[in-house]
Image: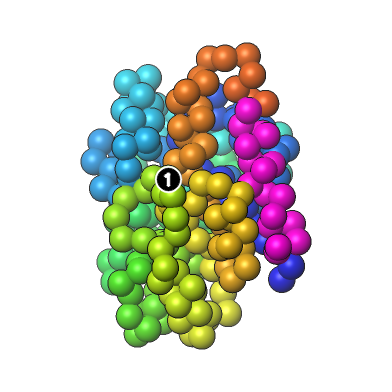
Amino acid sequence: MSRKALVVYLMAGVDTPALAEAAVAGGADIVEIGFPFSDPLADGPVIQRATQRALAAGVTLPRVLELVREMRGEVSVPLVFLTYYNPILAFGLKAFCRTSVEAGIDGVIVADLPPEESGPLRAEAMGAGLDLIHLVAPTSTPERMRKIARASEGFLYLVSLTGVTGERTALAPELTQQLRALRAITTKPVCVGFGISTPEQAALVGRLADGVIVGSAIVRLVERHGGSADLLARVGDFIAGLKAPLRSGS
């Protein structure tokens, strides 16, 4: 495919609907919405700070679902939750899946839920029409990649590096090999995240992957300029810059 997807991550909060609209206007094809959890094991410092701000502001899963309903009327691209298993379990698996779909969510990524333990959530997700998207680690073997690919719907989230989320000056040298290995065992779309923060990096990943996921760089932009009159314009312009090299796959 010549046109590659740009997946944009936003931490849920009071400005999420407006930021999501700005992201889509800038070229985002999918919007990931994180809702805060007190022990974000896979998140780097930027998203951890966003998590703490959201928790301090009283952001809860029911409130996030309200925000999704609000933005769904204005945002037509797929919306995907990115979270951890504990908040889902506390909410109730069936209630979470059905309420998420009713609110307008298309899929969910659960960072700490391996496919071996995802059966109960997968059953409820399938029944509700919610895609359960799994992560592929840099250390995943071909056998494990196959297991993850079979368990995933929507797309596969390939983690580009070992460690937590956050901007990096360079991509992992093993990424090309990882992408080729994953391509060899599945025809499902593969999107790459962790560490991508510039148009140049997006272009490199877009040559081999179906999509590019960017989170920390956008969350940092919101952190620096939150409350300013030009925040939405800054976010939209930054996303447009990331999207430009993906439109032609160049």
Nearest the camera: 197 or 96? 197
Q: Residue at x 66, y 34 (%)?
A: 236
Q: Residue at x 55, y 55 (%)?
A: 201
**Image location of residue 237, percent across then percent down:** 68, 34
Q: Is residue 93 left or right of residue 206?
A: left
Q: Which residues are magenta?
A: 234-250
Q: Locate the C terminus by quadrant.
A: bottom right
**Image location of residue 6, percent across then percent down:** 62, 52
Q: Secondary structure at mark 1?
A: loop
Q: Is residue 69 left or right of residue 77?
A: left
Q: Is residue 249 left or right of residue 35?
A: right
Instruction: Residue lying at the far front in this picture: please name it.
Output: 169
Amino acid at pointer 1: Glu
Nearest the camera: 72 or 232? 232
Looking at the image, residue 134 lies above or below residue 12: below
Q: Residue at x 43, y 75 (%)?
A: 178
Looking at the image, residue 213 lies above or below residue 123: above
**Image location of residue 13, percent across then percent down:** 47, 27
Q: Residue at x 54, y 24 (%)?
A: 15
Nearest the camera: 12 or 196? 196
**Image location of residue 72, percent across then percent down:** 65, 38
> Can residue 30 be seen in the rendering of this structure?
no
Say whether residue 35 is magenta: no
Looking at the image, residue 154 lies above or below residue 219: below
What residue is disc 1 on?
Answer: 167
> Can residue 200 be seen in the rendering of this structure?
yes
Say whether residue 235 is magenta: yes
Mark 1 nearby-residue class (10 Å; few <14, some 14–19, many ≥20): many
